[in-house]
């Protein structure tokens, strides 16, 4: 039985004072239904303070990135143990902005996933195709290749702590959302591939989130799809009332 997760990626938004204000608002006003989980991913500069603030709330706190080495001369990077010490329990890995703006490769994604797991940080591994790749009919090829390379070398046991997020690049921050049917088609193919790689029971238990312009107006339709297990939300997670409505998506019957 997969427990839905709604995850809010704040990206490089909100100075510390505004981040604390939003976290305060979430703490005071956001009740999470008992049948689902919720997590937020603030910028590094507010991670520790927000983790402390939300310690007694049902909202979990994670980081937007990590570096695979434990320490050393990696200016500007942050290690998994630093994130753990700051209170993170999850980490987003391979977000399309990191892949496309910062040149992160599948090989680096794979190293980060292993480092996160070794530090008991739950990785949310993001994959997704560009518009040109979709238009060329290459969506399935692209996402399956990213999945295989990003999860390379993991055992089925290690996979129990991995969450996937399908985030079509053309839908991130653009206001264009994949239709529920488009999301379902890709999620089902990812689950089938997980089954082939790690066995059906693992595939059936793995959470696959959808991300890309998720809003109050489209979340119910997406969450009604059998293989959509939650949402990775960017822009709408910066608005307390929108994020609240997304957390309270209407669960499909049955
Ligand atoms: C994201 O940041 O992962 C994302 C999906 O952003 P948005 O919801 O703004 O498209």
Image (cartoon, rainbow, N blue to C red):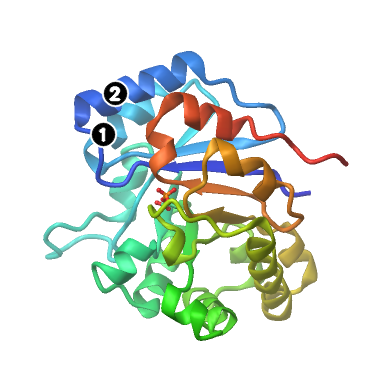
Query: Dot 1: what SS?
Result: helix
Residue at point 24% right, 54% down?
A: 78
Task: Spot the residue most to the top.
Answer: 28
Residue at 79% in and 49% down: 1
What is the quadrant of residue 62 in the picture?
top left
Determine contact: label 1, label 2, CB under 8 Å.
Answer: yes
Q: 6 or 55: nearer the eye?
A: 6
Quadrant occupied by the C terminus: top right
Judging by the rendered image, the residue that carries numbered circle 2 is 20
Residue 69 rendering spot, x and y as whole percentages: 28, 66
Say if disc 1 is inside 8 Å of ligand 1.
no
Residue at left offset 28%, top offset 56%: 79
Q: Is residue 68 visible?
A: no
Q: Is mark 2 within 8 Å of ligand 1?
A: no
How far apart in space, not on screen, are marks 1 and 2 (Cα)? 8 Å
Density class for disc 1 (Cα within 10 Å; few <14, some 14-19, many ≥20) is some
Q: In the rendered image, which residue does mark 1 sit on? A: 46
Q: Position of residue 216 (x, y in %)?
A: 56, 36
| Residue 169 placement (x, y as % from top left) | 42, 65
Disc 2, SS: helix
Q: Is residue 150 left or right of residue 19?
A: right
């Amino acid at each position: 039985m997969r427990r839905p997760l709604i995850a809010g990626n704040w990206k490089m938004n909100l100075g510390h004072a505004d981040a604390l204000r939003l976290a305060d608002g979430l703490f005071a006003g956001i009740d999470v239904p008992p049948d689902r989980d919720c997590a937020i991913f603030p910028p590094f500069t507010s991670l520790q303070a927000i983790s402390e603030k939300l310690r007694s709330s049902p909202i979990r706190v994670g980081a937007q990135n990590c570096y695979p080495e434990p320490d050393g001369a990696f200016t500007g990077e942050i290690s998994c143990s630093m994130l753990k010490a700051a209170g993170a329990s999850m980490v987003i890995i391979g977000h399309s902005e990191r892949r496309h703006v910062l040149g992160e490769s599948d090989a680096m994604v794979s190293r980060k996933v292993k480092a996160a797991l070794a530090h008991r940080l739950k990785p949310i591994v993001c994959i997704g195709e560009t518009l040109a790749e979709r238009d060329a009919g290459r969506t399935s090829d692209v996402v399956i290749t990213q999945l295989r390379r990003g999860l390379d070398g993991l055992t089925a046991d290690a996979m129990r702590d991995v969450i996937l997020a399908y985030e079509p690049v053309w839908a991130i921050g653009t206001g264009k959302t994949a239709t529920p049917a488009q999301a379902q088609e890709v999620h089902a193919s990812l689950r089938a591939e997980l089954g082939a790689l790690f066995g059906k029971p693992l595939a059936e238990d793995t959470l696959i989130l959808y991300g890309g312009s998720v809003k109050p107006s489209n979340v119910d339709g997406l969450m009604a799809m059998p293989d959509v297990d939650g949402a990775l939300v960017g822009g709408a997670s910066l608005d307390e009332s929108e994020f609240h409505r997304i957390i309270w998506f209407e669960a499909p019957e049955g």
